[in-house]
Image (tube, helix red, strand yellow):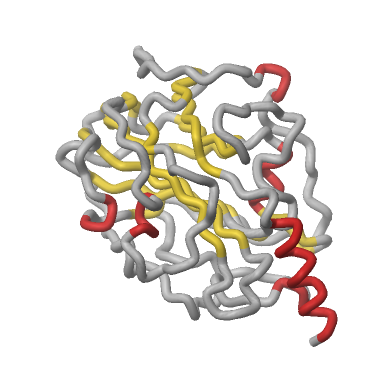
């Protein structure tokens, strides 16, 4: 018990200085910057899963941009600690913010006006505990890749406007009720394609409970497996934790990381 509380206090002291926000979007290898994100007003995390803020954060800035995305294409969301700081020299989010990265989408009539807490969300990607030898989490993948997390837009979904919800859940304080921290941003996208699939959805708030095993967990007792909260991802499966050391080399070419942030929606051909 003493060890747990020492770890808890240490994590709190370090973590308070290393909060972050999802800020930029990539359409394949095209940098869309912040042109279609509803930027959070601060990097302070959410902790109340019953609040409407859990959908798209607390009164995020509005955006008139809607980024065109081809169904079946790869998209990358990008996280950093401070606004407009894309430097790979800094961790995307504090190292102790161990936890999963999760991506949701919601079909909407107008991405610029849709209210995240009133729409239905389906999960399209998730990464949690990648290795239990030593524990290696999705947030560490972000840090190894300059804040980048890449996933695929389902190829068979209906075309039209969507909200895209990026989330990192930090579990370093989750050994106490409501201790999990949620870092959330919503992007405005328009899917181009000819699909017709309409996946089953969940609501935010509603998809999570504070007592879910993936949100109320003591990391300092050692974790060999981890249940990512929320529904099963549509059309994909989760990575099973490896029993061998996970490679920490970047899969993103960090030498190509830009220093500026585009604000104009790019054209995708």
Horizontal and vertical percent position of residue 3: 84, 80
> Residue farthest to the bottom?
1
Horizontal and vertical percent position of residue 23: 50, 35
Q: Which quadrant is home to the N terminus?
A: bottom right
129 versus 68 height, above or below: below
Which residue is drawn at the image coordinates 55% and 77% (left, top)? Answer: 213
Image side of residue 262 versus residue 54, left or right = right
- Give the camera-side residue of 19 and 234: 19
141 versus 250 height, above or below: below
Horizontal and vertical percent position of residue 153: 39, 38
Residue 242, by quadrant, is bottom right
Image side of residue 234 versus residue 30, left or right = left
Residue 195, by quadrant, is top left
Which residue is drawn at the image coordinates 74% and 51% (left, top)? Answer: 95
Horizontal and vertical percent position of residue 103: 45, 48
> Residue farthest to the left?
109
Which residue is drawn at the image coordinates 66% and 40% (left, top)? Answer: 92
Which residue is drawn at the image coordinates 21% and 57% (left, top)? Answer: 118
Q: Which quadrant is home to the C terminus?
A: top left
Q: Is residue 9 visible?
A: yes
Q: Is residue 130 visible?
A: no
């Amino acid at each position: 018990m003493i060890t747990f509380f020492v770890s808890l206090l240490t994590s709190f002291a370090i973590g308070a200085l290393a909060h972050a926000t999802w800020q930029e979007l990539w359409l394949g290898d095209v940098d869309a910057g912040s042109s279609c994100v509803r930027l959070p007003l601060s990097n302070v995390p959410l902790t109340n899963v019953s609040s409407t803020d859990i959908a798209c954060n607390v009164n995020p800035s509005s955006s008139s941009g809607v980024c065109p995305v081809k169904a079946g294409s790869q998209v990358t969301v990008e996280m950093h600690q401070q606004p407009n700081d894309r430097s790979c020299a800094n961790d995307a989010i504090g190292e102790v913010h161990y936890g999963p990265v999760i991506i949701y989408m919601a079909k909407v009539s107008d991405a610029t006006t849709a209210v995240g807490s009133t729409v239905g969300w389906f999960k399209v990607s998730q990464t949690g505990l990648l290795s239990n030898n030593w524990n290696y989490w999705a947030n560490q993948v972000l840090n190894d890749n300059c804040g980048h997390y890449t996933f695929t837009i389902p190829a068979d979904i209906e075309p039209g406007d969507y909200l895209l919800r990026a989330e990192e859940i930090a579990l370093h304080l989750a050994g106490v009720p409501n201790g999990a921290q949620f870092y959330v941003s919503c992007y405005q996208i328009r899917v181009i394609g000819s699909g017709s699939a309409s996946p089953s959805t969940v609501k935010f708030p509603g998809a999570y409970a504070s007592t879910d095993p993936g949100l109320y967990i003591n990391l300092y007792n050692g974790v060999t497996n981890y249940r990512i909260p929320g529904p099963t991802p549509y059309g994909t499966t989760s990575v099973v934790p490896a029993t061998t050391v996970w490679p920490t080399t970047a899969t993103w070419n960090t030498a190509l990381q830009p220093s500026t942030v585009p604000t104009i929606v790019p054209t995708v051909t």
